Image (spheres, rainbow, N blue to C red):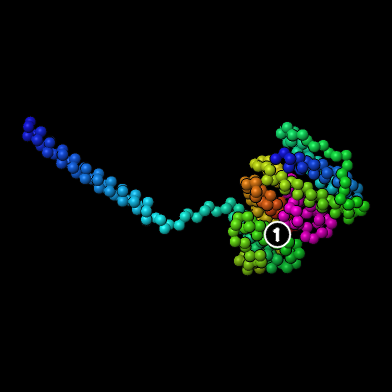
Amino acid sequence: MSEELAAALAAEHAAVYAYGPIGVRLKGKAVDQARDAEAAHRSRRDSLVLLLTAKGVDVPPAAAAYALPFPVTDEASALRLAVEVEERTAGVWRAALPATEGPERTRVLDGLTDAAVRATRWRRRAGITPATVPFPGRAT
Amino acid sequence: MRSTDTNQDTGLPGRSRRELLRSVALVALVGATGALTGCGLFEGEPEPPPAPDPLEPMMAGALDLAARYEAAIAAFPELADRLRPVAEAHRAHATELARVIGATPPPATAAPSPASIGGGTSDADVLRELRKAEQEGRDAAKKACTEAPADRAALVGSIAAARATHLEVVR
């Protein structure tokens, strides 16, 4: 159970990191959207740290830096990375669902759902259609 | 005294015999019923049907949502670009749920919709109704995910999340 939650924490650390380079390439309302997304990832990260600590699990620390899957050089690549970060995060949360139950599973589902909703918002902003996928978090 | 004793003597055995006979008859009846139950009468009865799968309402809900979107697209073709992917997602959910349940897969294409949209309804009304249905479906899926066994949690969770994303595009 804790292994999957630790993976979710690692994904949230990486997401918080990625919104740094994403944010600086965006303009206007997209900047606010990125700021909100980053705050949501920080909040998920913090509650996971508390949960894992309460379970007596060694909490994986954030890395100093994360390798981005592609360089973020302009608005288009920033939006593409934002979509990818949310899709990856959704995948890690989804993988934690079978390992949890009860209120903990509800929290994990909230992690998956929020990431899926943010991925949809970023696809809309990037003009990607369709903006939704049938099975968020599932490898395609 | 003696005659009374005699009367009692002759009377009691008489009652006892009747009671004995009645008891024997009852035993015979119970025995016969028992034999019928055991051997023949109910042997041909079918097994009671298994309890419905807990995901069946969710599959029916996915098909209902798909039909609602398809009816909306039929009434307002200009909404098709936005609504078609959502309708298809609901059908894909129903297909996956059927596979997990072990049910006959629902038709991949739309059945003629029984719930066509009446004239005089605006596209804003239709979208509002779709949002309401989607929100209810999302809540139901969230609950189903919490209650699902581990091997179904990821699928049901993805469906719950998908329904939440639909609310982003249906507005």
In this rendering, the count of numbered labels is 1
Range of magenta residues: A111-140
For residue B126, say whether it is visible: no
What is the x, y in percent for residue A114? Answer: 75, 48
Relative to B74, say whether B16 is above or below.
above
Quarter of the image for residue A13 reads top right
Q: Judge from the rendering whether residue A50 lies leftward or rightward of residue B59; answer left or right.
A: right
What is the x, y in percent for residue B141? Answer: 65, 51
Secondary structure type for disc 1: helix
What is the x, y in percent for residue B171? Answer: 74, 57
Q: Residue at x 68, y 62 (%)?
A: B69
Q: Residues within 10 Å of mark 1 (few under 14, many from 20)?
A: many
Disc 1 residue type? Ala
Relative to A18, say whether A129 is above or below.
below
Q: Judge from the rendering whether residue B68 lies leftward or rightward of residue B171; answer left or right.
A: left
What is the x, y in percent for residue A123? Answer: 81, 56
Residue on which the image places disc 1 = B89
Q: Judge from the rendering whether residue A30 lies leftward or rightward of residue A95; answer left or right.
A: right
- Name the residue nearer the viewer: B34 or B51: B34
Does the magenta run of residues contain A115?
Answer: yes
